[in-house]
Image: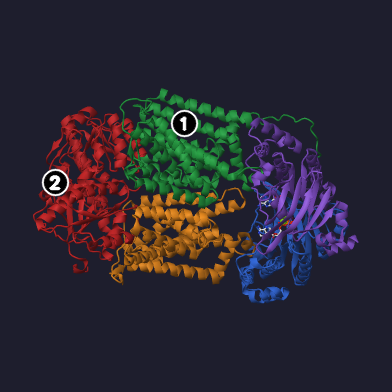
Amino acid sequence: MSSPALKVKGLHSGYGDIRVLRGVDIELPPGAVVALIGANGAGKTTLLRTISGLVPASAGSVEIGGTPITALPSHRVVEAGFVQSPEGKQLFSGMSVMENLMVGAHGRRAHARRHETLEEVFDLFPILKERRSQIASTLSGGQQQMVAVGRALMALPRVLALDEPSLGLAPIMVDRLFESIARIKARDLSILIIEQNVFQVLEMADYGYVLENGQISLSGTGPDLLADAHLRATYLGL
Amino acid sequence: MNAPLLSVEAISKRFGGLQAVKDLSFRLEEGEILGLLGPNGAGKTTAFNMIAGFFRPDEGRVLLAGRNVAGLKPWDICKAGIGRTFQLSKPFGDLSVVENLMVGGFARSSDRRRIRTLAEEIAVFLGLEAKAETEAHNLTAFDRRKLELGRALSTEPRLLLMDEVVAGATPSEAVEMVALVRRVRERGVSVLIVEHVMKVIMALSDRVLVMDRGALIADGRPQEVVTSPDVLKAYFGERYVVPRA
Amino acid sequence: MSVTPHPHPVPLTRTTSPMGFSRGGIALAVLSGAAALLPLVTADSFLIHSAIMVLFFAYMATSWNFLCGYVGQLSLGHAMFSGVGGYVSVLLSTTYGVSPWIGMLVGGVVAAALSVLIGYPTFRLKGPYFALTTIAFAEIVRIWVENTDSFLGFRIKGAEGLVVPGVGGDSFWAFQFSGKTAYYYIILAMLALAILATMVMERSKLGYCLKAIRGDRDAAEALGISPTRYTQAAFAISAFMTALGGSFYAQFFRYINPERNMGLELSIDMALMSIIGGQGTPFGPLVGALLLMPLGEISRGYLGGQFLGLHLVIYGVVLMITVLYFPKGLIAPITALANRLFGRGGRP
Amino acid sequence: QAPAATSAPATISIGCVLPLSGGSASVGNQIKAGTQIAVDQINREGGIKSMGGAKLAVLFGDSQSKADIGVTETERLITRENVAALCGAFNSAVTFPATEVAERYKTPWVVLGAVKDEITERNFKYVFRINNKANYDAREQVDAIDLLAQESGKKPKTIALIYEGSDWGRSHAANIKKFAAERGYAVVLDEAAPPNQVDFSNQLLKVRASRPDVLIVAFYTPDHLILSRQLMDQRLDIPFGVHSVGGGTEDPAFYKAIAPRAVDYYFVQEDFQIDIVEATKDPAILDADKRSKEMLGYGLTAYSAQGLATIYVIRDALERAGSADREKLRDALAATDIAAGPALAAGYQRIKFDAQGQNTFAHGVISENLGGKRRTVWPKDNRLPDTKPVWPVPEWSKRPNS
Amino acid sequence: MDPLILSFAVVNGLLQGGIYGGIALGLSLIFGVLRVVNFAHGSFLMLSLYLSFWCWSLLGMDPYLSALVTVPAMFALGYLVQRVIISPLIVRERALVVEPLSALLLTCGIFLVVDNLALMAFGPDVRSVQLSYYMPSVMLGPIPVDTPRLIAAASSIGVAVAVSMWLRYSHLGRAIRATAQNRDAAAMSGIDVPQVYAVTFGLGCAILGLFGALIAPFIPVNPQIGVAFGIKSFIVVVLGGMGSLPGSIIGGLVIGVFEAVASQFVTATSAAIFSLGLFILVLLVRPAGIMGRA
Ligand SMILES: Nc1ncnc2c1ncn2[C@@H]1O[C@H](COP(=O)(O)OP(=O)(O)OP(=O)(O)O)[C@@H](O)[C@H]1O
Ligand SMILES: Nc1ncnc2c1ncn2[C@@H]1O[C@H](COP(=O)(O)OP(=O)(O)OP(=O)(O)O)[C@@H](O)[C@H]1O
Ligand SMILES: [Mg+2]
Ligand SMILES: [Mg+2]
């Protein structure tokens, strides 16, 4: 059997003397969509930043497709195939849409194939093709989110992580975004998705993890989780 | 009847082309806990910041016990009797818990002894007495949130504005926080609370406001509001409505 | 964990407050007591002279620290206040025969007034912008003095500098003493008072407000603190203290000129000693001066002839090491050690 | 060097406070070399004979051009090193307070280089100055103009002044203005510039606009280099030449760094007769010139010569005092009257102090740069027979393009 | 005031201002990308002047040709300084332990070390390159304009344009701009941020290397020369807007012309006071500088 697309074991990290992750274990099978949910401040973003090498891990390991990437610098993590669309979009706000996408294709492998990938991204988000020379900061929130996802796709990821892609989006935009994600899923790609929109995301995910207090407290398939009483009580206020 | 403690009258705020808050009006009575809900980007924090004096409203008035405080500087608003907490908690990391609490006390008085006594009392109130001398940056995330609340209390406000106080808390911590906010009210402080966690809002609020795209779309008792179709649609998304229905 | 309500506030074990204060106070008392013995145990005039230099720079750094260390802004223009203090006291005494003791206070007040003029527009600037603006203000004052021969009837004498005419022999009123011991005790007292002032300030409303502003400006504002007002107050006090130091320098060396007493180099020295020693702490600047002054003296005395500028290279290296490895200054490991040796006392 | 700890002839220490680092480090190091050469020469010839061949040693203190540090170093040299006498400290701002320390400790101090008038106007008993006071420099420049005018019958009328805006330049300019007024020259431009200029175009534009007959300048080396180059590049003609007072133009590094044609016909006032090596037969001076070339890469300069002379003046006093006792040494210094020997390396005819310790025979020497060599033109006594001053100076367009 | 003289003052000001601007380019670039205020900027200029001088005096290289040495050498030096000294601080700052002023203090340490090592190594004497050929001044009406200054001023505009174009259109340039705008997002896009930082620091120093060679024919070098240019560069960059390359040139021209014209009316010392006053005024009215984004 092939090794998991992403495997996180016993990961610890934090900021200065603030400890945020206290032993996180996650596995992403190839081609799967996995949801990660948890309260605000639970450490979801921190997990992604730690995997990306932006926050140093104090213990634990991360593997991509069987290759260990713990403690690699960020750009090597991207080369290894883990790419995220960060929380709050984090566009290069003074640069055009096209430039934002091109920065995404910075790595050697991605750079070589950038023209093909660009066509695919434009297929996925036709509006971006129209607005290719618009300055990113003047786009609407939904469009900005598309740029962020598109930029991540430009790096030819094996594992695509989306951190709260629906944040700040009108529900109708959220629906569209989730449609797009469904289409991305059709490509040979694993997706790790963090969402507040728990219902929607668990419906589309193959599997879900709940992060609480820096540890995984619960995991299971979407429907299982949705049926879980604890989860319903904590996150849905039901 | 005399004037409500807080009366917000048609405040608006634009950021460039974006109308973040539009004609928002509501009242808050003395002793009330009022919840403010709304999807991300609805304008809650912006409204909150206008009341707390961090933004000057483009239009409208904010009356605290009948006195317009809109456009006052944050420190003057604090002295007028409005305390606030921040969405991202911002304790003074180099100072100990008690010292953090004392900073707030200086807003009202220069009497060190009195302030220290008050700070210690609040540390006990928060359940942080064992950590009173701990430097704030060594606190856990949740303790920092409590400290954030206590620091606002130490300015002896009449109204406390709280932005997402339980974000990041575990369920049991949330329970503790809910109890704490109730006891804040028992101290005679009215509360305006912005919160995403429904359970907290439902448990705490006497009344709930719901904002969407800068405007108020609902105002009422918690149970009534969450079952209103408008709110369900705006806040929880259409798919959420289906399983509930 | 559930919440246990406390009907009556439980008194807490105090450690930092009165205890900590007295600990700092004890340290200050012990240190100044020990320092006061120096002239009694040695007649070595060079040693006392060097000690005066250390105390003087420690005093200047402490004055700088009063504002910059506690607000977290880097002023590189403080020498301007030193110059103002020196010039005002000397000019008053040479022109009107006013005692330098009074001139010193007048100089302090003038410096404080100048600080208000400068601080008001400047405090909104952050980081490097603030630092550069303070340099610009100080340079304006320096260049102006260097090129002004007389002003309001005072003979400023431009770049030439001012000489304090000797009265011959001891005169307390004229702030002139034939030996060094008197100067030693004066600067020691000034330093002890400055450190005491810093400790008192730390625990006063002003101190809390400054630390709050440094910690988080927005949060401080929400707690009723107007940043400009408190920063300005600290700036004025710091300028006042610096000016007293400038007056002392003038009386001790009986000569001042704009280049040395208002120049950028003095400002940088004040800042570096504080930062290396530990800004934002009462004793940090003293530690900085105690380390850097003898370092300079030794490398000058023994190596200066051979290697030009070696002591400044050492300064630079010490500064880099401090920034990289002791971001809180050298006082941090020292207090940690002191706590390990004498500490624990009172901590639950 | 460290004094050798031999038993018989004692070693007499002389302290020397100099700016060895910081802005005036170059000057400090030239003086230092001069004093070392003198000490070596004296020791080689058997030390202080009246004291049984006692050897001399110079101990240096680096003032960094700062008053407080200079004072500290003075304290150290007097109380720690127990020096018999002191010299230094080039910068007036350092010398002024440091000599006060020496006076308090009753330790003789021979002033080296510092020109501030008041240094020898305080009724001090232990302070002596061989070289000029500041106002002599200015007077000599005007004297030289007068002399050349009188010799040629061509008298300039207007003077432009540009100078560095700190102590030295400003006080020199003030003195020039005083003498110019007395002697009937009109000052048409009086312009101070902050030190460390990187461009003099603006000042030169003003000079050009004011059309002076004479340009008097006072700048340190880096500024002077830029100024001189731009004067040449912009072909600014000054009929009666550029008259510089020491500073950059007495620094050999200046001449190494500039094309010779840029400084042709420059008049330079300095406390040193630049062609002394040709004028004198004193073997000590000739030897010193040779040693200086080995140590510094160039022959004697105003500064190394003054360093040399100072040590010889102190030696003379030691010989007469027969003791390193400070009091006796002071009395011997006060009775100094030297009319020959390397103590006159700077070009004086005699050294004799007045009651204030000022050498009443001090004078500077003014040279003109002729055919790539600087030749003494003033005072007439110091002018070599083959020197023919060029006055007025040729226009740029008439000079050969090297 | 004679209008002819005044117009020459403006020309002089533009020349000098262009040179100021060119020298300040590296400072602005480094700040724009790394947010590091390089206090040692002037020291690096001093080093490149020395390099150019040694190339001329030891190898007999023409100072303009010595750019072939100074540019790569200064690039390497900048690259190393960033990698070895500054990057540990940036790594730590990300973890929010240090206040941002530490970078300024750190480079202040570099300044002390470099300037005084230069004093120890090269001695205090002033040295200067002399061109072996005669470069006639360009005549502007009756008044000559120094050709080497003209070359340096023109080059600074050329360099500003070239570097801006390179940043705009090249692959690496785009990566540098992206890193400047959002360090984390750049890292998440596969950009090797430490490498970009080191290259940028190197580039900033390489520009200084170029200007070292360009001004060597008319600026003598001694260990203290850096301070004069360093302070001037700060003023220029803050005036123009920190991080903006065109701003750096414009800031230089503004200061240059202002000083030149002002010093025709008052003495140079008063002009210095006025230009510091202008600096303060601009900062107070427009804290982000003339070309900076507020
Ligand atoms: N740069 C930082 N420095 C210090 N603490 C931080 C930093 N970033 C985050 N934290 C803290 O780390 C904890 C986890 O934050 P994180 O952003 O990972 O949570 P999250 O699960 O992504 O929350 P959200 O749903 O709000 O995005 C929080 O307590 C937060 O306050
Ligand atoms: N300083 C600002 N400049 C420009 N736009 C702003 C600014 N602050 C807020 N906004 C915009 O105003 C809108 C309202 O923001 P606000 O922070 O008030 O939302 P919120 O209801 O608090 O959301 P959340 O639940 O995510 O905290 C958003 O679209 C936001 O992007
Ligand atoms: Mg997050
Ligand atoms: Mg909000």
> Residue at left 48%, top 70%?
E162
Q: Where is residue D122 in the image (x, y as percent from the top left)?
A: 25, 33
What crowding class fits label 1: few (fewer than 14 Cα within 10 Å), some (14-19), or many (20 or more)? some
- Residue A62, above or below C257: below
Q: In which quarter of the image is residue B224?
A: bottom right
Q: Quadrant of residue D88?
A: top left
Q: Name the residue under label 2.
A: D283
Q: Which of these two is toward me, E143 or E53?
A: E143
Q: Which of these two is toward me, E65 or D374?
A: D374
Quadrant for the N terminus of chain C, please: top right
Quadrant for the C terminus of chain C, please: top right
Is residue C56 in sight in this rendering? no
Read off the chain for label 2. Answer: D
The amino acid sitting under disc 2 is: Pro
**Chain B on-screen colour:** purple
Q: Mark 1 points at which residue?
A: C190
Label 1 near label 2: C-beta < 8 Å? no
Q: Which of these two is toward me, D257 or A95?
A: A95
Q: Which mark is residue D5?
A: none
Q: The green chain is which one?
A: C
Q: The red chain is which one?
A: D
Q: Where is residue D151 in the image (x, y as percent from the top left)?
A: 9, 56
Q: Where is residue D15 in the image (x, y as percent from the top left)?
A: 28, 36
Q: In this view, does D86 lie to the left or right of C183?
A: left
> Residue at left 35%, top 31%?
C97
Q: Which chain is blue?
A: A
- Residue C6, above or below A12: above
Q: What element carries label 1?
A: helix
Q: Quadrant of residue C328?
A: top right
> Residue at left 64%, top 44%?
C220
Q: In this view, does E98 lie to the left or right of A226?
A: left
